[in-house]
């Protein structure tokens, strides 16, 4: 069964595996508020739909996601906790069924941080991960200020989050962010193959195992996502972010010298 909540977010349900495809190639799969709302709705519906046993998230072979749509953030910054971006983050971080991701090409900002809430991640050898929040006058989101140092250790987290330095698929594999590197043309097929394996297992056992593995961190992650979203929401309207977004739209380097 194929449905499409909006053209930029495609869904397809087959034998217990629900695929969610980010499909906005002309804008490098950057994500607007409308897309976050659609993704949150898909996740919330999938949670209570017995026909869905596993979720697969993917982009395109050339680009996973360029992160938040910068024009959208400039014009309509999310100002409340029920804004679509925060609804999406809550839905993905609290999703009880397994999530498998196929990641190829750039995965910027939330394109990388949403992966912290996936269970199995298969990356194309062209994958490039980055969390350039500081470069945009922002701060980490999606619980990344907690989960990235836990995953990589503080020194490498500081390079990724304070300097905003990108890292390759090989580095992501070595740090334990992803499971395997394959040619980009094979990433989606491998993700679906692994998802089918999960879908064939007893769902209650899969859900309970995921819950137990995540239990030690669950309330800290929820609290951190909330704390980050308060700071992130405030910083979106402050001078540094406004300068960074405006510079991006005007295709120039930002000037933070007066900020
Ligand atoms: N928001 C809005 N538009 C974006 C975008 C974003 N996050 N990322 C890319 N686009 C737009 C570009 O402005 C460009 O538009 P144009 O055709 O009108 O000039 C188009 O998508 C193609 O992007 P381009 O930068 O030319 O593609 P590229 O292949 O050279 O680079 C990226 C791809 C993802 C590396 C680069 O686009 C990028 O760094 N994007 C911004 C990422 C970012 O800072 N995201 C926010 C994280 S919080």
Image (cartoon, grey):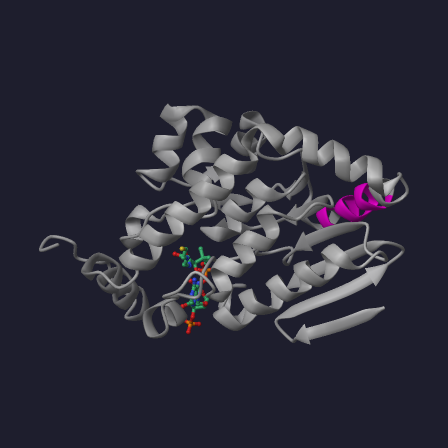
Residue 175: % across, % down: 53, 27
Q: Nearer the viewer, residue 59 or 61?
A: 59
> What main secondary structure does the magenta stretch of the protein show?
helix
Location of residue 182 with respect to 157 vertically, above or below: below
What is the tally of numbered marks visible in this picture? 0
Tell me which corner region of the image, top left, top right, bottom left or bottom right, holds residue 80.
bottom left
Q: Nearer the viewer, residue 49 or 9?
A: 49
The span shown in magenta is: 187-196
The single residue placed furthest to the left in the displayed view is: 258
Tell me which corner region of the image, top left, top right, bottom left or bottom right, holds residue 68.
bottom left
Q: For the C terminus, which image quadrant?
A: bottom left
Magenta stretch encompasses residue 191: yes
* Left-right relation of 63 to 153: right
**Can you see residue 126?**
no
Residue 111: % across, % down: 52, 52
Location of residue 212 with respect to 182 vertically, above or below: above
Identify which residue is drawn at 57% across, 56% down. 63
Residue 31: % across, % down: 51, 64
């Amino acid at each position: 069964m194929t449905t499409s909540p909006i053209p930029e977010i495609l869904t397809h349900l087959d034998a217990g595996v629900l695929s969610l495809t980010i499909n906005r190639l002309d804008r490098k799969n950057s994500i607007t508020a409308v897309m976050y709302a659609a993704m949150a709705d898909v996740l919330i519906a999938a949670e209570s739909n017995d026909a869905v046993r596993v979720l697969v998230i993917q982009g395109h072979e050339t680009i996973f996601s360029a992160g938040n749509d910068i024009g959208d953030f400039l014009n309509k910054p999310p100002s409340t906790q029920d804004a679509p971006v925060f609804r999406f983050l809550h839905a993905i971080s609290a999703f009880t069924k397994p999530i498998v991701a196929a990641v190829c090409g750039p995965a910027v900002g939330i394109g990388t941080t949403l992966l912290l809430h996936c269970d199995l991640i298969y990356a194309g050898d062209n994958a490039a991960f980055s969390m350039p929040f500081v470069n945009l006058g922002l701060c980490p989101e999606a619980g990344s200020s907690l989960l990235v140092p836990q995953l990589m250790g503080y020194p490498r987290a500081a390079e990724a989050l304070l300097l905003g330095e990108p890292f390759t698929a090989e580095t992501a594999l070595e740090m334990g962010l992803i499971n395997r590197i394959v040619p980009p043309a094979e990433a989606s097929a491998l993700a679906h193959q692994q998802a089918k394996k999960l879908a064939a297992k007893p769902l209650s056992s899969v859900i309970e195992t995921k819950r137990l593995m995540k239990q030690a961190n669950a309330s800290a992650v929820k609290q951190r996502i909330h704390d980050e979203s308060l700071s992130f929401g405030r910083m979106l309207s402050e001078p540094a972010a406004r300068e960074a977004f405006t510079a991006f739209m005007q295709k120039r380097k930002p000037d933070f010298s007066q900020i």
